[in-house]
Amino acid sequence: MDNIIKIVLADDEELFRKGIYFLLQREKNIEVVFEASNGAEIIDYLKTCETQPDIILMDLKMPGINGVEATKIIHKEFSDVKIIALTSYNTKSFIANMINVGAVSYLVKNASPSEMVETINEVSKKGFYYNDTVLEVIQDDILSGNKSNKSAFDDEFLTNREREVLTLICQQLSTNEIAEKLFISSRTVEGHRTNLLLKTESKNIAGLVVYAIQNKLLLTDEL
Protein backbone atom coordinates (compact mmCIF):
# COMPACT_ATOMS: atom_id res chain seq x y z
CA MET A 1 0.00 0.00 0.00
CA ASP A 2 1.31 3.42 -1.03
CA ASN A 3 -0.26 5.21 1.92
CA ILE A 4 1.76 3.36 4.55
CA ILE A 5 3.75 5.82 6.68
CA LYS A 6 7.28 4.47 7.18
CA ILE A 7 8.68 5.37 10.61
CA VAL A 8 12.13 5.25 12.19
CA LEU A 9 12.27 5.22 16.00
CA ALA A 10 15.34 6.81 17.59
CA ASP A 11 15.66 6.50 21.37
CA ASP A 12 18.42 5.01 23.51
CA GLU A 13 15.94 3.74 26.12
CA GLU A 14 15.04 0.34 24.70
CA LEU A 15 12.02 -0.25 26.94
CA PHE A 16 10.45 3.06 25.93
CA ARG A 17 11.33 2.52 22.26
CA LYS A 18 9.76 -0.95 22.22
CA GLY A 19 6.62 0.47 23.84
CA ILE A 20 6.28 3.02 21.03
CA TYR A 21 7.01 0.29 18.48
CA PHE A 22 4.16 -1.92 19.68
CA LEU A 23 1.77 1.05 19.86
CA LEU A 24 2.52 2.11 16.29
CA GLN A 25 2.46 -1.40 14.85
CA ARG A 26 -1.24 -1.55 15.80
CA GLU A 27 -1.95 1.27 13.34
CA LYS A 28 -2.87 -0.06 9.88
CA ASN A 29 -1.29 2.86 8.03
CA ILE A 30 2.00 2.97 10.00
CA GLU A 31 5.04 0.71 9.70
CA VAL A 32 8.16 0.95 11.87
CA VAL A 33 11.00 0.19 9.46
CA PHE A 34 14.01 0.75 11.73
CA GLU A 35 14.99 1.34 15.35
CA ALA A 36 18.07 3.26 16.47
CA SER A 37 19.68 4.05 19.81
CA ASN A 38 21.75 7.04 18.63
CA GLY A 39 22.09 9.52 15.80
CA ALA A 40 24.94 7.68 14.07
CA GLU A 41 22.78 4.57 13.60
CA ILE A 42 20.02 6.64 11.96
CA ILE A 43 22.41 8.37 9.57
CA ASP A 44 24.07 5.06 8.62
CA TYR A 45 20.61 3.61 7.94
CA LEU A 46 19.55 6.58 5.78
CA LYS A 47 22.74 6.24 3.71
CA THR A 48 22.18 2.55 2.97
CA CYS A 49 18.41 1.90 2.93
CA GLU A 50 16.69 1.32 -0.41
CA THR A 51 13.63 3.40 0.45
CA GLN A 52 13.82 6.48 2.66
CA PRO A 53 11.47 6.56 5.67
CA ASP A 54 8.78 9.22 5.82
CA ILE A 55 9.21 10.25 9.46
CA ILE A 56 11.75 9.87 12.25
CA LEU A 57 10.62 10.03 15.87
CA MET A 58 13.73 11.58 17.38
CA ASP A 59 14.78 11.60 21.02
CA LEU A 60 17.07 14.48 22.06
CA LYS A 61 19.31 12.83 24.64
CA MET A 62 21.22 9.98 23.00
CA PRO A 63 24.88 8.92 23.26
CA GLY A 64 27.30 9.94 20.54
CA ILE A 65 25.37 11.99 17.99
CA ASN A 66 22.38 13.30 19.94
CA GLY A 67 18.98 14.25 18.56
CA VAL A 68 19.75 17.92 17.89
CA GLU A 69 22.95 17.22 15.97
CA ALA A 70 21.36 14.28 14.10
CA THR A 71 18.45 16.52 13.09
CA LYS A 72 20.88 19.12 11.67
CA ILE A 73 22.61 16.48 9.54
CA ILE A 74 19.40 14.80 8.35
CA HIS A 75 17.72 18.13 7.57
CA LYS A 76 20.69 19.02 5.36
CA GLU A 77 21.42 15.67 3.69
CA PHE A 78 18.00 13.95 3.67
CA SER A 79 15.63 16.91 3.51
CA ASP A 80 12.59 14.86 2.45
CA VAL A 81 12.61 12.93 5.74
CA LYS A 82 10.40 14.60 8.35
CA ILE A 83 11.57 14.70 11.97
CA ILE A 84 9.27 14.72 14.99
CA ALA A 85 11.04 15.45 18.26
CA LEU A 86 9.83 12.99 20.91
CA THR A 87 11.40 13.88 24.23
CA SER A 88 10.89 14.53 27.92
CA TYR A 89 12.42 18.01 27.52
CA ASN A 90 9.61 20.51 26.98
CA THR A 91 11.14 23.87 27.87
CA LYS A 92 11.08 26.74 25.40
CA SER A 93 14.80 26.47 24.54
CA PHE A 94 14.55 22.79 23.60
CA ILE A 95 11.42 23.32 21.50
CA ALA A 96 12.81 26.37 19.72
CA ASN A 97 16.16 24.67 19.12
CA MET A 98 14.63 21.57 17.52
CA ILE A 99 12.24 23.58 15.34
CA ASN A 100 15.07 25.89 14.26
CA VAL A 101 17.34 22.99 13.22
CA GLY A 102 14.64 21.28 11.18
CA ALA A 103 12.11 19.32 13.26
CA VAL A 104 8.56 19.64 11.89
CA SER A 105 6.79 18.76 15.14
CA TYR A 106 7.48 18.36 18.85
CA LEU A 107 5.97 15.77 21.20
CA VAL A 108 6.71 15.33 24.90
CA LYS A 109 6.97 11.77 26.18
CA ASN A 110 3.97 12.13 28.48
CA ALA A 111 1.72 12.74 25.46
CA SER A 112 -1.09 10.23 24.96
CA PRO A 113 -0.83 7.50 22.32
CA SER A 114 -3.67 9.16 20.40
CA GLU A 115 -1.74 12.48 20.36
CA MET A 116 1.30 10.71 18.97
CA VAL A 117 -0.67 8.95 16.23
CA GLU A 118 -2.47 12.21 15.37
CA THR A 119 0.85 14.04 15.11
CA ILE A 120 2.31 11.38 12.80
CA ASN A 121 -0.74 11.46 10.54
CA GLU A 122 -0.79 15.28 10.43
CA VAL A 123 2.90 15.44 9.60
CA SER A 124 2.39 12.84 6.88
CA LYS A 125 -0.46 14.88 5.35
CA LYS A 126 0.76 18.45 5.80
CA GLY A 127 4.51 18.15 6.30
CA PHE A 128 4.35 19.66 9.79
CA TYR A 129 2.20 19.79 12.92
CA TYR A 130 2.52 22.31 15.72
CA ASN A 131 0.38 22.15 18.84
CA ASP A 132 -0.52 25.27 20.83
CA THR A 133 2.64 25.11 22.98
CA VAL A 134 4.95 24.93 19.96
CA LEU A 135 3.03 27.65 18.13
CA GLU A 136 3.44 29.93 21.12
CA VAL A 137 7.21 29.34 21.16
CA ILE A 138 7.47 30.02 17.41
CA GLN A 139 5.40 33.19 17.76
CA ASP A 140 7.57 34.40 20.65
CA ASP A 141 10.68 33.80 18.54
CA ILE A 142 9.25 35.80 15.64
CA LEU A 143 8.14 38.69 17.85
CA SER A 144 11.47 38.84 19.64
CA GLY A 145 13.45 38.35 16.44
CA ASN A 146 15.35 35.59 18.19
CA LYS A 147 16.67 32.96 15.79
CA SER A 148 19.48 31.67 17.98
CA ASN A 149 17.68 29.66 20.65
CA LYS A 150 19.81 26.64 21.40
CA SER A 151 19.53 23.82 23.93
CA ALA A 152 22.21 22.01 25.87
CA PHE A 153 22.26 19.24 23.23
CA ASP A 154 23.31 21.68 20.51
CA ASP A 155 27.09 21.65 19.97
CA GLU A 156 26.89 25.44 19.52
CA PHE A 157 25.03 25.95 22.82
CA LEU A 158 28.17 27.30 24.50
CA THR A 159 30.77 29.41 22.71
CA ASN A 160 34.40 28.26 22.71
CA ARG A 161 35.26 31.04 25.16
CA GLU A 162 32.42 30.02 27.48
CA ARG A 163 33.72 26.45 27.42
CA GLU A 164 37.20 27.70 28.32
CA VAL A 165 35.87 29.78 31.20
CA LEU A 166 33.71 26.88 32.41
CA THR A 167 36.70 24.53 32.44
CA LEU A 168 38.75 27.01 34.47
CA ILE A 169 35.85 27.64 36.86
CA CYS A 170 35.66 23.88 37.41
CA GLN A 171 39.39 23.92 38.19
CA GLN A 172 38.55 26.39 40.98
CA LEU A 173 40.43 29.33 39.49
CA SER A 174 39.37 32.77 40.69
CA THR A 175 37.99 35.46 38.39
CA ASN A 176 41.35 37.27 38.34
CA GLU A 177 43.24 34.02 37.65
CA ILE A 178 40.91 33.16 34.75
CA ALA A 179 41.29 36.69 33.35
CA GLU A 180 45.08 36.44 33.53
CA LYS A 181 45.17 32.99 31.95
CA LEU A 182 42.87 33.94 29.04
CA PHE A 183 44.26 37.48 28.60
CA ILE A 184 40.86 39.10 29.14
CA SER A 185 39.50 41.50 31.75
CA SER A 186 37.93 40.40 35.03
CA ARG A 187 34.71 42.10 33.95
CA THR A 188 34.64 39.97 30.79
CA VAL A 189 35.12 36.82 32.90
CA GLU A 190 32.19 37.85 35.11
CA GLY A 191 30.09 38.35 31.97
CA HIS A 192 30.90 34.85 30.74
CA ARG A 193 30.16 33.45 34.21
CA THR A 194 26.75 35.15 34.22
CA ASN A 195 25.97 33.82 30.73
CA LEU A 196 26.97 30.31 31.79
CA LEU A 197 24.68 30.41 34.82
CA LEU A 198 21.77 31.67 32.68
CA LYS A 199 22.30 29.23 29.80
CA THR A 200 22.73 26.16 31.99
CA GLU A 201 20.05 27.27 34.46
CA SER A 202 22.55 26.70 37.27
CA LYS A 203 22.08 28.53 40.57
CA ASN A 204 25.75 28.65 41.54
CA ILE A 205 29.28 27.52 40.69
CA ALA A 206 28.61 24.05 42.09
CA GLY A 207 25.74 23.75 39.62
CA LEU A 208 28.10 24.67 36.76
CA VAL A 209 30.51 21.92 37.81
CA VAL A 210 27.70 19.35 37.89
CA TYR A 211 26.50 20.55 34.46
CA ALA A 212 30.00 20.26 32.98
CA ILE A 213 30.43 16.70 34.28
CA GLN A 214 26.95 15.56 33.25
CA ASN A 215 27.45 16.90 29.72
CA LYS A 216 30.99 15.50 29.48
CA LEU A 217 32.52 18.92 28.88
CA LEU A 218 35.50 17.97 31.01
CA LEU A 219 37.00 14.89 32.57
CA THR A 220 36.90 14.39 36.34
CA ASP A 221 40.72 14.44 36.43
CA GLU A 222 40.54 18.06 35.21
CA LEU A 223 38.84 19.06 38.46
Image (tube, grey):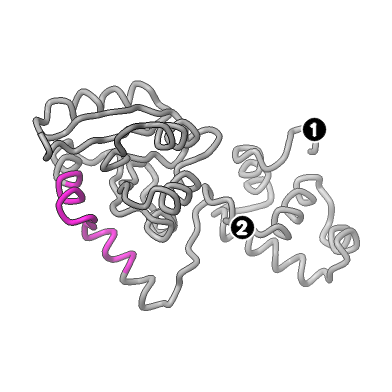
Q: Earlier in the sequence, mark 2 or mark 1?
A: 2
For the N terminus, the image quarter is top left
Residue plotted at (28% across, 52% down): 105
Instruction: Residue at 33% x, 32% y: name it.
Output: 50
Residue at the location (43% across, 77% down)?
145
Q: Residue furthest front?
A: 50
The answer to which image quadrant residue 10 occupies is top left
Which amino acid, mark 1?
Answer: Asp
Number of numbered discs overlaid on the protein picture: 2
Crowdedness near tag 2: few (<14), some (14–19) or many (≥20) residues, C-alpha within 10 Å: some
Query: Which numbered disc, 2 or 1, marks the residue closer to the eye?
Result: 1
Q: Magenta segment range?
A: 119-138
Residue 147 located within the stretch drawn in magenta? no
Name the residue carrying label 1. 221
Q: Where does the C terminus fall, quadrant-wise? A: top right
Q: CA distance from mark 2 to mark 1?
A: 23 Å
Q: Position of residue 175 (x, y in %)?
A: 82, 61
Which dot marks residue 117?
Answer: none
Q: In the image, what residue occupies the spot 69% across and 51% down?
A: 205
User: Percent from the top left, x then y, of residue 195?
Assistant: 63, 63
| Magenta residue check for 125 | yes
Horizontal side of 138 relative to 121 (left or right) equals: right
* Residue type highlighted by circle 2: Leu
Please state if 47 lies on the left or on the right of 222 as rendered. Answer: left
Q: In the image, is residue 168 above or below residue 116?
A: below
Estimate the x, y position of residue 197 in percent, counting from the top left: 61, 58
Characterize the magenta stretch by its predominant secondary structure: helix
Query: Is 10 or 88 nearer to us in this picture?
Result: 10
Q: Secondary structure at mark 1?
A: helix
Residue corresponding to mark 2: 197
